Image (cartoon, coloured by chain):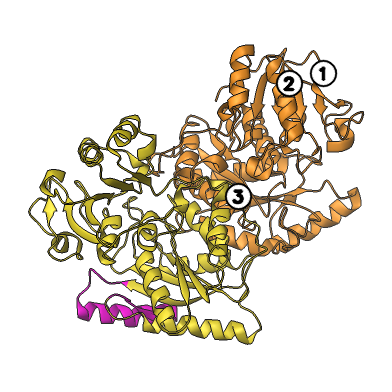
Chain colours: A orange, B yellow
């Protein structure tokens, strides 16, 4: 996938009926890393409000009721990714409108725009370009014989979906590069792909080839000093743990970052299924990660968006003591501490002769 | 998938260039459970030999050089499943010949016969039926809210691929049914599907939906006293561990059976990558399985095909002591001991009020 994203592009984010941080993950990610110029969101149920109010990022960017209110936009990004990828009536209507206007339409849904007969036909007529971020032809099994011994492999994992693994991955890679260790963010989901301009949505890969697709992403990053492979799902979320496992073994990382959202007690989408204690989740990751390659946690990334300043400081103290690992909210504070831990691991491995 | 397999069917197994127990898993499984009537194998590199000599099952069933030597056959089953599913020249030639003869052709490859333009065209002309066992349209995420509390869920797992999980699953389900506990073998791979007549090749499901596809298979087995869900791959085989994990969490079993092949030291297909000690593999399975549902191992299934009688007895003693679990080769001995352990678990759970 190549983005060819122009500086002058004017982006609309379609988040119809789901403009919340958990449901509009793609929109939130795009707003956070202000890709091109986002001119608005489309959600007929929230018209008149702002991105900042609803998503906590994007400030005054307005929410429109429909496409017609933003005639200057030239790109529509479907900013939600419903489980299973079903396409509701209002979503279909807005996408159709964008295609008829000749806009570029990008989607991270499991439902492929290019496979839809009506969308394809309309796009052919209008010149609209349809980009299905999740579409892939991965049919390679992993081989595990070609990792670059001089490139450190880091991987973000979580105790659940939607805890901030992508943000931590982007911030860590950028922080390490600023610190002199040229690091590639390896995008493994549609939002990361929009931000980085390459990658693969591994949850859309046929199960037999998920480790192979992950390995291929790491191999494509050769020449960097380090990679941060974005995690997906969680071993503790049984709906998506297969994806999590395939990623973990596909990149065989030396260093892991544990990501969680403070205050969340239940598995997202499977409520009231309880989330296991972080200690158990960490033990599970170490158990499976170390079956084939030595691996340790370098730190914990707290998503503290639901906490006050005082609550955050208490949470941080508590979690550091419980897990015996350094912990930060890299958005609220800074990613520098986590970068230091990553560079420390790199030095330790280099002292042993290799990071592979 | 419905098999509609007639008693009078005459089956040829295509194992071109790969008539070995590890490569011709599908052929070996079909021969073991003598589905319909197998009249021969096709492998131009082994013509004149027998199934028994090459695969250890099937006795005097002959190996032919080509399709033309078995004019009475009406079904061709592709009995090998190459990694990635590429189709070599000789394979393509024999499949084409079978289609031109109007035979039913069944394949478990990732490469779909029905997607091949030449095959489809020829089949249309000859009336040949093309069955792609791995083809699926699974797009449901798991929900975990509808397991039958009165149906025990057992699952076979391994320390690697190709250790005999399918055979153990079939034997255990049949043994339990004989013992009065009506048990369904839940097929999760192409060979199991050929034997059972239903199921889903979960390794061909898009990663996001593997747990959902597994859950759906279990829910479709409602009304049975127990299910044995066939395992795939291994947590210790990083190439396929995503599939293994998705299956494990998709069925959230109460009881596990550990399957391994005695004498194997390296991960199949990834040699010289060493297999971890069984203790570590068992600990990993328990760690991830118990994150969301209480689960324990009920026993160990030894595949001792490489061992003499004396070697087998020593291996059995050793592994029982090391793992503190009862162990058997269910083919060499009998499945009765494992059945007893499964029924014991069922009683324990029933005493607690539910097996769910």
Q: Is residue B64 left or right of residue A350?
A: left
Mark 3–mark 2 CB contact (< 8 Å): no
Q: Is residue A220 left or right of residue A5?
A: left
Mark 1–mark 2 CB contact (< 8 Å): yes
Place of residue B176 in the rendered image (x, y in percent of width and height, measured from the top left): 43, 79
Circle 2 residue = A97
Q: Which mark is residue B140?
A: 3
Residue at 64% in and 60% down: A281
Place of residue B246 in the rendered image (x, y in percent of width and height, measured from the top left): 53, 56
Marks 3 and 1, Cα distance to the nearest angstrom? 34 Å
> Which type of secondary structure does the marked residue at label 2 adopt?
helix
Q: Is residue B322 left or right of residue A264?
A: left
| The image quarter in which residue B218 lies | bottom right
Q: Is residue A216 at all visible to an observer of this figure? A: yes
Q: Is residue B78 magenta?
A: no
Circle 1 residue = A68
């Amino acid at each position: 996938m190549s983005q060819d994203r122009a500086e002058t592009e004017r982006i609309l984010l379609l988040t119809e009926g789901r403009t919340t941080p958990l449901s509009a993950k793609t929109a939130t990610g795009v707003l956070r890393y202000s890709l091109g110029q986002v001119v608005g969101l489309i959600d007929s149920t929230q018209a008149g409000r702002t991105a900042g109010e609803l998503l906590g990022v994007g400030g005054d960017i307005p929410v429109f009721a429909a496409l017609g209110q933003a005639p200057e936009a030239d790109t529509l990004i479907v900013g939600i990714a419903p489980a299973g990828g079903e396409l509701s009536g209002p979503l279909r209507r807005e996408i159709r409108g964008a295609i008829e206007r000749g806009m570029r339409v990008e989607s991270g849904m499991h439902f492929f725009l290019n496979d839809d007969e009506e969308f394809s036909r309309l796009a052919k007529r209008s010149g609209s370009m349809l980009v299905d971020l999740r579409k892939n032809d991965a049919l390679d099994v992993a081989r595990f014989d070609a990792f670059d011994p001089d490139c450190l492999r880091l991987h973000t994992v979580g105790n659940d979906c939607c805890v901030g693994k992508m943000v931590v991955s982007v911030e860590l890679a950028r922080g390490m590069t600023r610190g002199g260790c040229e690091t590639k963010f390896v995008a493994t989901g549609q939002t990361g792909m929009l931000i980085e301009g390459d990658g693969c949505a591994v949850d859309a890969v046929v199960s037999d080839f998920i480790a192979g697709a992950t390995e291929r992403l790491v191999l494509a990053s050769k020449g960097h000093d380090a990679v941060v492979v974005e995690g997906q799902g969680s071993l503790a979320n049984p709906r998506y743990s297969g994806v999590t496992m395939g990623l973990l073994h596909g990149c065989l990382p030396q260093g892991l970052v544990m990501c969680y959202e403070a205050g969340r007690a239940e598995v997202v989408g499977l409520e009231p299924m309880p989330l296991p204690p972080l200690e158990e989740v960490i033990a599970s990751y170490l158990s499976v990660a170390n079956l084939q390659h030595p691996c340790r946690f370098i730190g914990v990334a707290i998503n503290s968006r639901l906490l006050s300043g005082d609550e955050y400081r208490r949470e941080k103290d508590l979690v550091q003591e419980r897990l015996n690992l350094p912990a930060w909210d890299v958005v609220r504070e800074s990613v520098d501490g986590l970068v230091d831990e990553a560079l420390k691991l790199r030095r330790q491995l280099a002292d042993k002769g290799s990071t592979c």
